Structure formats: structure tokens, C-alpha cells
Amino acid sequence: MKVHEQSNDFERTDEKMTLEEQQDSILPVGKMEINRENTALVIVDPQNDFLRDDGVAWELVKESVEANQTIQNLELLLKAGEKNNLKLFISPHYYYPTDGDWQFGGPLENMMHKGGMFKREDPLSLEGFEGSGADFLESLKPFIKKPETIVASPHKVYGPQNTDLVLQLRKHGISRLILAGMSANLCIESHLRDLLEQGFEVAVVSDATAAAILPGLNGEQAAKVNVRMIANAMWTTEETIKRLEGE
């Protein structure tokens, strides 16, 4: 009888709680702290094919990008990172001509290859790169093109396992990461999972990313579920900046 009463009390309490409060009561909120000595900003795929209105993937991610104000939030995040002397790491996504000869791939890999997404003409040349879909979004370039920015070698599918991102982070003494960029349920989530396995603390900025929304397939919602469950923290851009400012 007591067990039954306790169960009813719990249910009544839940009814009075917001969805976020219910989640927090079950999943402890992460307590990642920002330390400027060992915390860095990692931006994934801040490229035209995702974020410019003529990009290969724009029509798929447009709804999510505009709803989240992803571009504006990336600009704010980069500005705050620069102001607070955080190291900036970029993890880009490039495909070279020989990558088009791959014999197999998943649905999105095949779509990217078919559409010429992130296409580079030559791994040893920047010919045709400026302003291309593989280039960085123009409004983000003032931050990305600074000499102190570390641009990792490119990933080819979703995660950083075959790039030098982890090496660069380790060599620069970084152990805590603020992760943002594109796209939420693919490269961001893949980076998150691998970096956690590598022993980093990772906070994901939930509105400085976006994802494809297809009929019956909402990439952003899928990402938010997984990020909330596995990241050390999930913050909005506003929350992240307040933490950077020490508020």
C-alpha cells in the first residue's frame, strides 16, 4: 500500500514540473567548468554548403538554421571566445576528386558526393576554393582566418577519428571543449561521441548548430535527445557566453 502511495505522489509531482525539470530530476545536470587555460572552442563544418543560401545542403537545414539563429549564434560565440582568449579549433569537411571513387557509402555520404558537397579540386591547392561550398562562411572568416586559429585536417564522413584534431587539442593542453557548428545529428554528434571517448569534457551549444529536417526525420530533435543524455553539458549561446564572462 505504501509503495502505491509513493508512486502516486511521484506522479503528482511530475505533473507540476516542466518537461525540462522532469529531465533534470532524472538526468543530473552536467557541471563542466570553463577554465581558460584548458578550455577551447571547437567549431565543426562552418562552411558554405551548410550555411549559405546557395549551399548544397541549405534547403535541408534552412528551417533549423533559421529557427535556431545558428549563424548569428556562431558569430556571437566566436566573438566571445576571442574576447576571452579561448583557443579556436576548426574541424572542416572536404572531399577531393579521388574521394568520388569510393565504392560504397551511407545515404548521406552518397548524397554529399552526388551533390558535390564540400568539393575541393586538389588537396595541395586552394585553386577554386575561395567562395566555394567548401569555403568558410564569409561572416565567420574574420575569426577563422586569424593566424592563431588551429584548422585540423579534414574529416571525410562524420567524426574526427581519422583527423589530427585530438592530437592538436592534446598538444595545446586542452581538456575541455565547447562544441558547435554543423550539423547537429551528424558531425557534431559524431565529434561529441569520439571526443568523450578520448577523455575530453564536452559542452555542446544547442542553438549554435542545426540539422536537416526531412519528412518524418527531424535531425535536430534526434541530436538534442542524444546530446542531453551524453554530453557533459548542453548550453545555449547565451548561457555559454555568460559562463565565459564569469557571470
Image: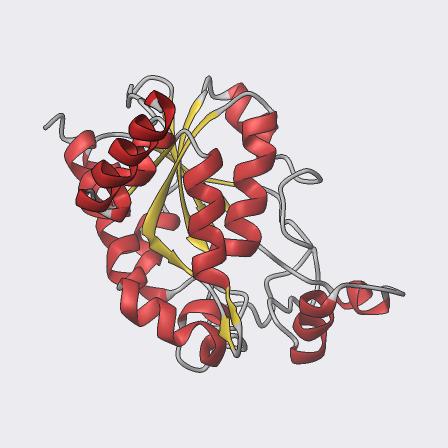
- In the picture as drawn, the residue positioned furthest to the front comes out as 1
Q: Which residue appears at 50% of the width and 63% of the height?
A: 219
Residue 58 visible? The answer is yes
**Residue 245 image point, x, y percent:** 14, 30
Q: Quadrant of the C terminus?
A: top left
In the image, 143 versus 99, the foreground residue is 99
Query: What coloring was used for the rendering?
Result: secondary structure
Q: Quadrant of the N terminus?
A: top left
Q: Which residue appears at 26% of the width and 64% of the height?
A: 69
Position of 80 with respect to 192 (left or right) is left
Q: Judge whether 40 appears above or below 70 on screen.
A: above
Q: Which residue appears at 62% of the width and 41% of the height?
A: 160
Q: Judge whether 219 appears above or below 154 on screen.
A: below
Image mark count: 0
In the image, 231 versus 217, the foreground residue is 217
Q: Quadrant of residue 167?
A: top right
**Residue 234 image point, x, y percent:** 34, 39
**Residue 161 image point, x, y percent:** 68, 38
Q: Which residue appears at 36% of the width and 30% of the height?
A: 4
Position of 67 with respect to 94 (left or right) is left
Position of 39 with respect to 73 (left or right) is right
Residue 45 visible? The answer is no
**Residue 221 image point, x, y percent:** 43, 59
Q: Judge whether 193 appears above or below 206 on screen.
A: above
